Amino acid sequence: MKLQFLGAQEGVTGSCYHIQSDKTSFLIDCGQFQGSSEEERKNREPFPFDPKSLDFVVLTHAHIDHTGRLPRLVKEGFTGRVFMTRGTASLSDILLKDSGKIHEVETEKENEKRLKAGLDLIEPYYDVNDVINTLQYFNPLPYEETYKITNDISVKFLNAGHLLGSAHVYLTLEGKSLLFSGDVGTYHSQILLPPRPAIQADYIFVESTYGNRLHKQMNIRFDRLADIILETIENKGTVIIPAFSVGRTQDIIYGLNQLDRPLSHIPFYVDSPMAINATKVFEKDLDGMKPEIIQKIKGKKHPFEMKNLQFIDDASTSYKLDYSKVPKVLISASGMCDAGRILHHLKTYLEKETTSIVFVGYQAEESQGRKIQNKKDIMIYGEEVKNRANVFTLHGFSGHADQEELLEWLTNVRPKKLFLVHGDFEAIEAFNKKIKERYKFDTYIPRLYETIEL
């Protein structure tokens, strides 16, 4: 049995594993590469297999870096079932449609340039219709139940605590057991139950995003955010929080709601149609949520709303926010500032010294967000935008486990081999060192596109 690493090696996006034997061929995740132009070019590379030959796909969770190449797979002939949890099915519907729309818009802009330059036009990587065609292959399953995909292959989803519906994937096939961590959630989530600890398997594949860091400010993260908001508003400025519409946005709203701080006079805007749809999913699909959150939702207490918060759906209202001189808080996607409505807000506000940009999540190497973090100027819609804003990075908001939590996740297992994936070089190297110190596991750090024999 062979396994090829097709993403989230030497980086944190594009998660994809191809498993192949004489009897079967399938994928774990089919994520999109995100960040630099070099990373995103990998999405255009041909799959190193015939999509028609795949029997099925298993998804760990809905984030685009784990699902975003799936419509392309279908576009090129894949017709098998896609297994995931119910929460992942609901959120993938939203996220993939948004991704398809982004590809359409970006391709339209690129073709305008090509038309003027006399170059051949290109097609979008995939469009919304490709996404709709993909949804017919979704096969949602509950947590903790073993499902036989074939006589020789079974799968079980274990709660990962990273995102609504997120899962560790436990597979048995050909006498071997494999555990894919997906993205391991933090034990300090306000909304989600903590991740299920790793269970024994022959081969374990563990993410390493924060393998070299410990989350700080966990107890004061929302107070620190409130301090930044109040100081910025007092200086007649605008606060921009680049946040993923699914998961992070709901976490921020809920956390601010719990504060005993004077924020009710400040206009808050969540500028994302996707966040509106995702919030509806969070209020309907309750698997993996903490009991107190479920109780609030069932009691119609709306934990993801605020009296002074407005969700922005239409684009015209979104653009009007950039002409408003009223001090305010804008929560907008994407979380790494690479696409979406956040770009036109940054184009307006990044150059203002009264603006505060607050990062509450991981910024991949060479992403727009990482450049802003490093106080660099950035290019938006072909124009250089000066970075004069006050830039803050608040730790403790990440949906990923930190180094100690990842080590704790591995407490009860003794795999034949542990593979470290989904991390930058420094993170993986530091995590690998800690694992060897504590557990003395046989570890391996695969390279992108490497094939191994299991």
Image (spheres, rainbow, N blue to C red):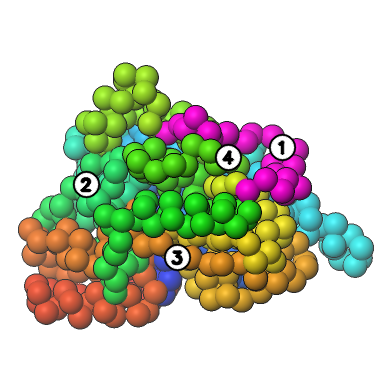
Task: Read off the residue under disc 4.
Answer: 267
Label annotation for residue 393: 3
Q: Amino acid at mark 2?
A: Pro
Furthest toward the top, the residue is 299
In reply to whether residue 373 is colored magenta, the answer given is no
Q: In the shown orientation, is residue 305 left or right of residue 165?
A: right
SS for dot 2 = loop
SS for dot 1 = helix
Which dot, 4 or 1, sits closer to the camera?
4
In the image, residue 129 above or below residue 51? above
Which of the two discs, 4 and 1, labels the residue nearer the N terminus? 4
Q: Amino acid at mark 1?
A: Thr
Q: CA distance from mark 3 to mark 4?
A: 22 Å
Which dot, 3 or 4, sits closer to the camera?
4
Viewer-closest of 439 and 454: 439
- The residues colored magenta run 304-327
Q: Residues within 10 Å of mark 3 (few under 14, many from 20)?
A: some
Which quadrant would the C terminus be assigned to in this image? bottom left
Q: Residues within 10 Å of mark 2 (few under 14, many from 20)?
A: many
Label annotation for residue 58: none
Task: Read off the residue under disc 1.
Answer: 317
Q: In the shown orientation, is residue 217 left or right of residue 439?
A: right
Task: Read off the residue under disc 2.
Answer: 194
Which of the two discs, 3 and 1, labels the residue nearer the N terminus? 1
SS for dot 3 = strand
Seen at 48% across and 65% down, the residue is 392
